[in-house]
Image (cartoon, rainbow, N blue to C red):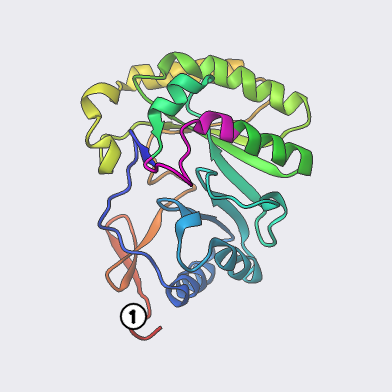
Amino acid sequence: MRCRFCISDAHLSSMTPAQCIAALDTLRARGFDQVVLGGGEPCEWPGDWRFAAREAKARGFHVQLGTNGVLLPDGFAHTPGVDRFVLPMDASHAELHNDLRRSAATGPGACADHFSLILRRLETLQRAGQEVTVSTVVNAANLAETAAIGQWLSRYAAQGGRVHAWHLYRFIPTGRGGGQHASTLDISDEAYEAAVLTGRRAAGSVRVFKRPDMRHSLTVDFFWQEGAHLKVGSEVWEKLPSAEAC
């Protein structure tokens, strides 16, 4: 996909399966007990996201899959090793959500109506009794949508959907999407805070987490491979096995 607010950089490299295992071992040794398999899009990982989920679960992690949902297979809600799915909802209707989360594909695999796909994925998780976290990137285009999204999630939960939380991420003007659309999507601190407050009031019993920085918070950090190293922020944590050695 080519989401207009994507913070990923195209130059980031992909871990090999051996590097993924080494990263999991490092995080476990440092006391982490929860992990989100993310990206980019983890379902495009050549090593297979299901392998990563199994390896993480075998090490005692609570495992989440943060995905756009497009490549999830039939029966995904019962994937061994995955405790929770993280899916996006960036508007309460298809027109705006699909404008923010545009498909990069044509033909087989294209997802012109991503909003309807997300509704189907959430329905599947509801039927399976599987837990989900929903994420929204709050930006200038959807500031007025947090009330409607919150109301939708409240109804979903009342109808039996297991919503672990709703994460409201603030748009960050960086990356291959956010960097290009900063002039049209960036928002002020005051606008973000107001949108969060509106969303919280509308979401009822659904827990809402404010995430002003996608990459860092008091409880969450993003880890990735850069060159031969596992990194978090500007800190190099661990040298991973080389791709050649794998």
206 relative position to 243: left or right: right
Residues in magenta, as a range: 104-118
Residue at image coords 47%, 72%: 26
Residue 106 on the magenta span: yes
Relative to 49, say whether 16 is above or below: below
Residue at image coords 56%, 15%: 148
Front residue (pair 145, 192):
145
Residue 22 point in image, percent of width and height: 46, 75
Residue at image coords 63%, 21%: 152
Q: Main secondary structure of the magenta part?
A: loop
Mark 1 highlights which residue? Answer: 242
Relative to 185, say whether 11 is above or below: below
Residue 203 in sight in this render: no
Residue 242 point in image, percent of width and height: 33, 80
Residue 144 point in image, percent of width and height: 44, 13
5 relative position to 81: left or right: left
Q: At numbered mark 1, what does the secondary structure look like: helix, strand or loop?
A: loop
Q: Quadrant of residue 63?
A: bottom right
Residue 81 in sight in this render: yes
Front residue (pair 108, 200):
108
Relative to 139, say whether 66 is above or below: below
Residue at image coords 36%, 24%: 139
Q: The residue under label 1 is which amino acid type?
A: Ser
226 relative position to 95: left or right: left
